[in-house]
Image: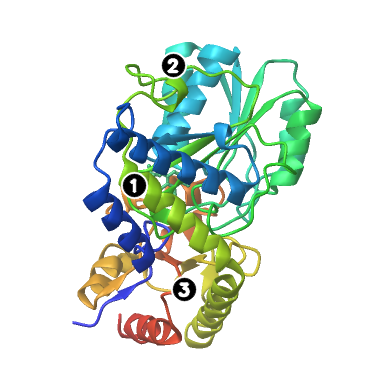
Amino acid sequence: MKTVYLDNASTTPLRPEVIAEMTKVLTQNFGNPSSSHSFGRDSKNLIELSRKSIAKNLNCNAQEIIFTSCGTEANNFILLSCIRDLGVKRIITSKIEHHAVLHTVEVFEKQYGIKVDFVNILPDGTVDYNDLEVLLSQEIKTLVSLMHVNNEIGTILNLEKVAQLCKNHNAYFHTDTVQSIGKTKIDLHELPIDFLVASAHKFHGPKGIGFAYIRKGIVLHPILLGGEQEKGLRAGTESVHNIVGMAKALEISMETLDTEKAEVLELKEYLTEQLYLNFPEVTFAGNPSDTFYNITNVILPFDENKISMLLFQLDMNGIAVSRGSACQSGSIKPSHVLEAFLSKELLKKPNIRISLSHYNSTEDVDYLIETLKKI
Ligand code: PLP
């Protein structure tokens, strides 16, 4: 059966160069990086070279990168440590965050008695910066946790603006950059961001590896206790092949960024055009010309009773898309992200999230449109 993968915000296929690099490490470098003999030193060396390469691509210091098992762990680590170690008494976040932040903040609110404020989301799915400024004007030790690119609708946070607002109001700034790292340039020398997180499987790297960036001078304590790995900030034997694979994936993504970004953007424009042409009453959650170049959330002018069968029928035809984040894609309830800003009428309509990569083509889009027309 023909298959078409249009769910790149959930995860991405690995680049062949990444697989080759990881295979080399798996076959040649099994030493424990904490061992003092040459096998261990070789593995340790690979980890530190990877850290340097990642830091170079983000224009930060290698010591500011801490490897974690995934984006979720990095988010948990930063949020918890800010409350416990930095005396944060309030978190300003939004209702459109990934559950890796939203659920974590909700639990910490109960567990640690912190205050949580949700910044207003505008009807186009973007953050209301005026509301953020009003919230920030309150005198309370604050962490702002707002994602860069939304994984369901592709809306983009203005990092410069929010970082500056936080700086002006003496608040820490954490941003979940899981959807944007490897897909856009982020210069941490220029941007006064305190913390960010990434996950390799979103940029054609392996699953089970991510990192946290912690600005130099900020002292956090680990949530995983044990050995002295990651300068004592994250105990546990490092996954050397995953770390090397992640660094390689980021390196290639940044080298090829301009060409791949242009290709994907062109494909998104083609997809939008075809959707309007074939379904004139189509609408979008988030304006497709303002959202990130690889994500679009389409609200289809189909009958409400088609919601439950839509993904199933696409899947039966070999097409992989989703409704919201992968963690909740089986649900027929509207996602928490759409609920935060869409009207009741639009929420009743079937929606699908289409997320592209440079491995997609116009034929993939044509096949999706033809299949949607038959539903
Ligand atoms: N944050 C965002 C915005 C995501 O899209 C995801 C993955 O879907 C995560 C965090 C979680 O990342 P991981 O799968 O590495 O835990």
Q: Mark 1 sits on what residue?
A: 242
**Left or right: 64 in relation to 6:** right
The residue nearer to you, when weighing 347 against 55, is: 55
**Residue, far front:** 38
User: Residue 292 location, x and y as percent?
Assistant: 58, 62
Q: Mark 3 sits on what residue?
A: 358
Dot 2 amino acid type: Lys
Does the CB distance between marks 2 and 3 fall below 8 Å? no
Q: Answer above or below: position of 263 versus 25.
A: below
Alpha-carbon distance for marks 1 and 2?
35 Å
**What residue do we see at 49% from left, 48% from top?**
178
Quadrant assignment, res 293? bottom right
Q: Quadrant of the C terminus?
A: bottom left
**Mark linked to residue 110:** 2
User: Residue 117 location, x and y as percent?
Assistant: 60, 27
Q: Quadrant of ligand 1?
A: top left
